[in-house]
Image: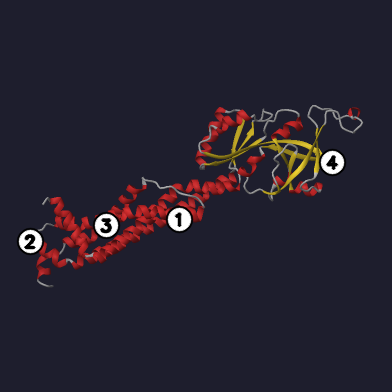
Amino acid sequence: MKRSSMYLRMITASIARRRSRMVVVLLAVTVGATIFAGLLMVYYDMPRQMGEQLLAYGANLIFVPSADSDGMTQDEIDAAVSKIDGEVASVISYCYESATINEAPVVIAGCDLDATLATNPYWQIEGALPSAEGEILVGLNQADFFSLKVGDTVTVSYLPADAQAVLEGENLSGQTEGEILVKFTVAGLLDTGSTEENYFYISEHDMSRLIGAEVTYDVTELRVNADTDSLTESIERIKASVPGVVPQLVKRITESQTTVLSKLSALVLLVTIITLALTMICVATTMTAVVTERRREIGLRKALGASDGSIMAEFMGEGLAIGLIGGLLGSVLGYLFARLVSTNVFNSSLSFMPALVPITVLVALAVTALACVVPVRNATKVDPAIVLAGE
């Protein structure tokens, strides 16, 4: 029989004879490896999941036109978006124009109305988003001011900047020369509890019809699933390559993400260290008991000429075998644990990472090996004469 086969047989036979204690060691290593693998997977995927959760509160990156520009074109916005390092979840651009309703000044926002809820999922709409030409979404504050409700008709008056508002320019209907009048039907009322309630929203097509010109944009809001460092690097690239666009971070979102991630990372690290320490203590205690039970066997082997190295190799081999099995089991159970955490805490799915298996196994082996150091050293200190004499 080959020496390696004999060594493997000795280890398996020794583990089989002490099944109850070895099961305790295996459970301890498996639990430790499970928590380590699960938390490692959650930690690795946490920035993405946390980013998705915080993006529910709105955009974390905005574009505004440069100081010498009258507005951003769609081509400039597309070029800027292409420079972003990260998953761009949604993009929406707004064109703001001053107009009047019943001679009262108002602000009209033209945008891709279908994209508003993707970028602003917290919006609450009574009625529906405008879906046809000539429909308008009214902020709740403006709806209260003008006593508007869903289904009402409202006339928006727009005066281009180059039009001359003079008395001589009025026609028989009272319309100022150059003034554009467009009738809209109220499709919905917008309730956000914020400044969005002070505006009227129409489609980009209706905005172009209202101002009598092609639409340019005053601000673009983006929801980007990326950390602050990646966003900062993207901003620098955009500034260097798209001069007509000025990118800015929405600090209330990005700073919150950084703060929460740092605290959660510290918590995950602390829990992992404590878990591995407890696993090490449990393994060390159990292996110490195993060495104590086998003192007479160790003494007999040393009396027959066994070296300290062979005794250390056997006990360490038993521990590493348990560590290997526990690490493999912990990799699978850790994925299930991480998936459970992601589903219940972040309401997000999680995919298995194959690279996690060797990492978990190596950590389990390292913890088991360290835990076996003291018991193995005690095994080599057994005095055959004393043990065999029955003392």
Picture coordinates of residue 365 (x, y %)?
28, 53
The numbered disc on residue 322 is: 3
Label 2 and label 1: CA atoms lie apart by 54 Å
Q: Helix, strand, or loop for circle 1?
A: helix
Q: Please state which of residues 27 and 47 is positioned toward the viewer in this rendering.
A: 27
Name the residue beneath numbered marker 4.
102
State the residue lying farthest toward the bottom: 391
How many discs mark residues in the rendered view? 4
- Extreme residue in the front direction: 132
First of labels 2, 1 by sequence position: 2
Callout in the foreground (3, 2): 3
The kind of residue on which mark 2 rests is Leu
- The earlier-in-sequence mark between 3 and 2 is 2
Q: How far across and down, in percent of the image, does residue 255 sit?
A: 55, 46
Residue in the foreground of this view, choosing between 155 and 97: 155
**Disc 2: CA contacts within 10 A as few (<14), some (14-19) or many (>=20):** few
- Quarter of the view holding residue 287: bottom left
Q: Earlier in the sequence, mark 4 or mark 2?
A: 4
User: For residue 216, which numbered disc appears in the image?
Assistant: none
Q: Is the Cβ of the residue at disc 2 closer than 8 Å to that at disc 1?
A: no
Residue 289 position, x and y percent, is 23, 67
